[in-house]
Image (cartoon, helix red, strand yellow):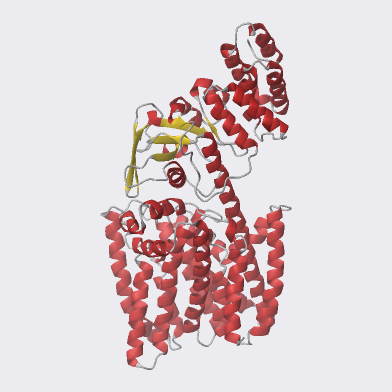
Amino acid sequence: MSFLHSKYFLFAIITLIAYGLLLPFTGFYWDDLPFAWIAKFLGPAEFVPAFLPFRPFLGSIFYFTTSLIPPVPLYWQIFALVIRFLLGISAWWMFTQIYPNKKNIAYIASLLMLIFPGYSQHWVALTHINQELIPFIFYLLSFGYTFKALHSSVHSQKVTDTIIALLLQICGIFPTEYFFSIEGLRFLFLFFFFQENFLNRLKKSLKIFLPYLLIWILNAAWLFYYYRFGPYNSYEVTATQSPNLIFFLTQALDAIWKTGFYIWIQSLVLTFSSLPAPASLLTLGLVALSFAFLTLILIRSVQDESNEKSFAISLIIIGLIGILLGRLPSLAANLPLTLQSSYDRFMISMMIGGTLFVIGIVELIFKNQKTKLIIFSGLIALGIGQQFFNANIFRRDWQKQGEIYWQMAWRMPALEPNTVLFTHQMPIDYETDLSFTAPINWMYAPDYTRSNLPYIFLYTEKRIGGPTLPALEKDIEIFYPYRTVDFRSSTSNAVVIYMPQNGCLRVLDPNRDDEEIYSREPNVLTDAIHLSDLSRIISNPEQPAIPPFFSEPEHGWCYYFAKAELAQQQSDYQQVASLGNEAIGLEFSPEDPTEWLVFIEGFALIGDLQTAQNLSNIILESDSRIRRGVCTVWEQIQVKSQEGSGQEIEAILLSLGCNP
């Protein structure tokens, strides 16, 4: 294998280690879910009108990729792996064109960009491949072709390369505003490329930069129009409405600190703070193995290369300015740069700047080539560890999604069309209510053809008081445009669900005094319970709902709880008790003791008061704060119970500390 090919091989190995180890266990997240639903039920062509109100030039990219790749999570995660590899190779080619005499730096910079640890959104594949990674690759290639044209001695080739660079610039800058401000990097690269006095550098750089500047101005005019006069309704430019020097200074320092320093050691901070969790130990082990492997490979394969102090300083300057330029679009929208959240997607526009800045720092401080390669090996290894750590977070999220969808299917085998599902929030980090809306429609309306959207999932905490949900009162119209289809219904067609951080999904019922049982929960949840209409749940459909993407898991406690709640809804208390006995026999038990309440009622109403009382004592011993819920259930039992058991139930109420 030649030296060149071995470098390609290293790119592939790093890509697989950083992003591929947990690939089969990851899936769809955030906007992936609605985009996958659109591709499945409305077709790839639907992305063109779907993006018209938002990013009109982005729809064609989605159309192209979704025409090639079906909406299957595994396929998109594999595609993300390929795109990430191509991004690294594109960065390598770009840097070799910009720094033809600094091949080591070009190679190291591309490896650092390959694993850039500030950007954790790789696994939101369907969304971010199309929205960011593909346009970013266009931009990297555009930079590269600009300098390829400079190196060409043939005029026709120079013109051809320049035209290609301009076309790639258009493909990179128009689909998304993420890269609007990094065009300034092209000018900086040009300025430091020429080895002349300041004035001549400036003249030559401006001359070459002029056509790119014209395209940038055209894009700026387009964005100004679309933000001010068009239908774009995603984010509003707010930061410039009340200029505050202190605010901008602190944001600039925050961006430099996070992108230039903190993200490179972030994996150590996260893993040491969560020891001895298995994921943290695995991450540290992977970092150690990667460091040893990379040190061996880089020291053997990278040749000595003299790098002057002035070159290191130029990298630091370009890096600093690149970080600040990359932060401008998100800062203009007044959006935070929060790591380990969806907001770190803004790091992609700071990737070039952050990479060159850290390389410049190392090059400036350390002179020995071997020392520098050891440091770079450490940084790459830490980046690999960070991405593996991120992958494990997304793996857990995908697993949790599967649990949620299957518990919905067990508890609500089918739903009447035009049903609104309400909750205040869900115990999951990477999905919103509108993200959940897509798979809920997928599982409850698998034969959907274009019409009004059958179902919607809304967080009361987020929507209350807004145009979608003005108030938690009956007969309020709900209208929501879900890309190119609409949802129309009312608050009277609602089912309210609740899923605690540790526990099973449940349907809340005003007829069993759930407002009282769950009174300790936030008002944005309990105030909606009176809207919950369980008649919208179809208990015995011909075709029960089957969640997409997930095989049915083994039946544990939550299965028995969901089926018991469903039986309780049908007043089949014998079935509730039977499910309870089966779960107890299998030694299943809940994480949330309130889940025993449905079984307490079931046992009591078939006459097994002793078992119901024993369960009540058990859960009160585990958490006395549940007494209100226990007492409420026993009061309902007293109302529903057969004649002749009233005195015995009163005695149980007294023994449990309830006021009969």
Residue 355 is left or right of residue 162, and the answer is right
Of residues 611 and 352, which is closer to you in this image? Answer: 611
Quadrant of the snapshot with the N terminus: bottom right
Of residues 578 and 83, which is closer to you in this image? Answer: 578
Residue 176 position within the rendered picture, expressed as x and y whole percent measured from the top left = 38, 62
Residue 577 lies, with reference to residue 26, above or below; the image says above
Of residues 655 and 38, which is closer to you in this image? Answer: 38
Residue 655 is left or right of residue 227, and the answer is right
Residue 59 lies, with reference to residue 602, above or below; the image says below
Residue 243 in sight here? no
Quadrant of the snapshot with the C terminus: top right
Residue 217 position within the rendered picture, expressed as x and y whole percent measured from the top left = 30, 69
**Tag count in the figure?**
0
Residue 435 lies, with reference to residue 492, above or below; the image says below
Residue 369 position within the rendered picture, expressed as x and y whole percent measured from the top left = 66, 83
Residue located farthest toward the front when viewing the structure as drawn: 542
* Residue drawn at the location 38% of the way across and 40% of the way down: 454
* Residue drawn at the location 42% of the way across and 63% of the way down: 130
* Residue drawn at the location 34% of the way across and 30% of the way down: 476
Residue 360 lies, with reference to residue 55, above or below; the image says below
**Occupied quadrant, residue 199:** bottom left
Residue 436 position within the rendered picture, expressed as x and y whole percent measured from the top left = 47, 45
Residue 207 in sight here? yes
**Occupied quadrant, residue 62:** bottom left
* Residue drawn at the location 45% of the way across and 57% of the way down: 71
